[in-house]
Amino acid sequence: MARPVQSAYLDALRMVNTQNSYYARRDYAADEAEATRRVAAALGAHEDEIVITRNATEAAHNLIRQYRGLGQGDAVLLADVDYPGFKSHMHWLAAGRGVRVIEIQMPTWANQAEILRLYLDAFDANPDLKLMLVTQVSNQQGLVVPVARITAEAKRRGIDVICDSAQAWGLIDFQVTDLGADWAAFNLHKWIGAPVGTGALYMRRGTLDRIAPYPGEQDFENTKVAARVHPGTFNFASRLAIPAALDFHEAVGSANKEARLRYLRGLWSEAALDMSHLEVLGGSDEESWTGIGSFRLAGKTTIDDAIALQRRLETDFGIFSVVRKGLASGGCVRITPQVFNTPDEMERLVDALAGLAGRA
Ligand SMILES: Cc1ncc(COP(=O)(O)O)c(C=O)c1O
């Protein structure tokens, strides 16, 4: 959270803590409606297409579990670059419904045309596909998947599309209508900078009949996105700070944030590409890159290698990074600058990367 967002959050927390049930039962619904209106406006969606959730997982898991359209002989599609917790949920869905799982494996290094080709080949080889998960920005290596082009082809073939935009919103500049997906999962506690515990579920108008209401909820007319979730009691104050987070995000500017993060990533990744002891993962054209990126020591693809690399960066160079384990090409370490990181800090990272030579 930026400071104005943190202040709004703490004010909301004090207010909720003082007014308790009186607030929750009288005024909260109107405040949540306002937060929903702001989320919808920021995403370029209609208000009736959005419901606020606790995180992207709640949104995506409900979509997957409550998907109605699968029967014997059908198949579902996912990719190694998808979020591990969503891949496992798709596997669970497929096992329960007796359908096949097709998994795309991304090369270490790919451009937009190559990524699209992998999806088109999977569509052509599997005419029984009914549902797919696609990830706008992978949390593994920051790869930007050409969701709009993939979705257009999927829809032509009658494949329903759940888009995971958890890592994308605030990192890259887009509107949800650009994606063409039936449904999308977002959070606001990553790149939007809202308090932890804020997410959103998007359901394009006309798609509600294919996602059942949350078990026990009723929506006979299939008009209520809100009937697709049942969160129980949650942190009111987090949601009350959403407008402040969007104010801050919009004041900085979505395009400015994307440009800043791309610039910071370029400062380390361009240097790393010239270091023969490193393997940089992700997009081989600028459209497939974003602010986050990953690398490994050349030829060191096991998870243990990635863990050792992460530790060395932290203990020898004072640089915190995270291990990612989900890619078909192996483990890696992710570098995740924020807008407030400085070019000097990226220079320190470059020095550290150079310092890794010969110490594998
Ligand atoms: C690509 C991606 N999808 C989904 C999620 C899950 O988001 P949340 O923690 O808001 O449920 C994450 C979180 O790291 C992510 O990076």
Image (spheres, rainbow, N blue to C red):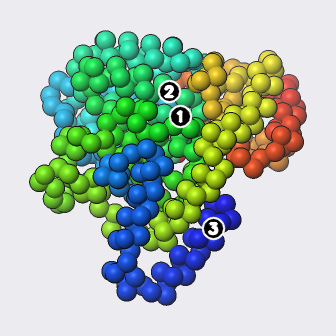
Residue found 53% across the figure and 75% down from its top: 12
Q: What element carries label 2?
A: loop
Which numbered disc flags the more N-terminal residue, 2 or 1? Answer: 1
Mark 2 = which residue? 145
Q: What element carries label 3?
A: helix
Tell me: is circle 3 under 8 Å from ligand 1.
no
Q: Amino acid under label 1?
A: Ser
User: 254 and 236: which one is in front?
Assistant: 254
Are circles 2 and 1 on residues that touch, CB within 8 Å? yes
The circle on residue 138 is: 1
Mark 3 = which residue? 6
Q: Amino acid under label 3?
A: Gln
Q: Nearer the viewer, mark 2 or mark 3?
A: 3
Which numbered disc flags the more N-terminal residue, 2 or 3? Answer: 3
Could you say which quadrant of the image residue 248 lies in? bottom right
Q: Report how many numbered discs are placed on residues in the image.
A: 3
User: 311 and 347: which one is in front?
Assistant: 347
Could you say which quadrant of the image residue 55 lies in? bottom left
Above or below, 115 against 23 in this view is: above
Q: What element carries label 1?
A: loop
Question: Residue 96: x percent and y percent?
Answer: 22, 39
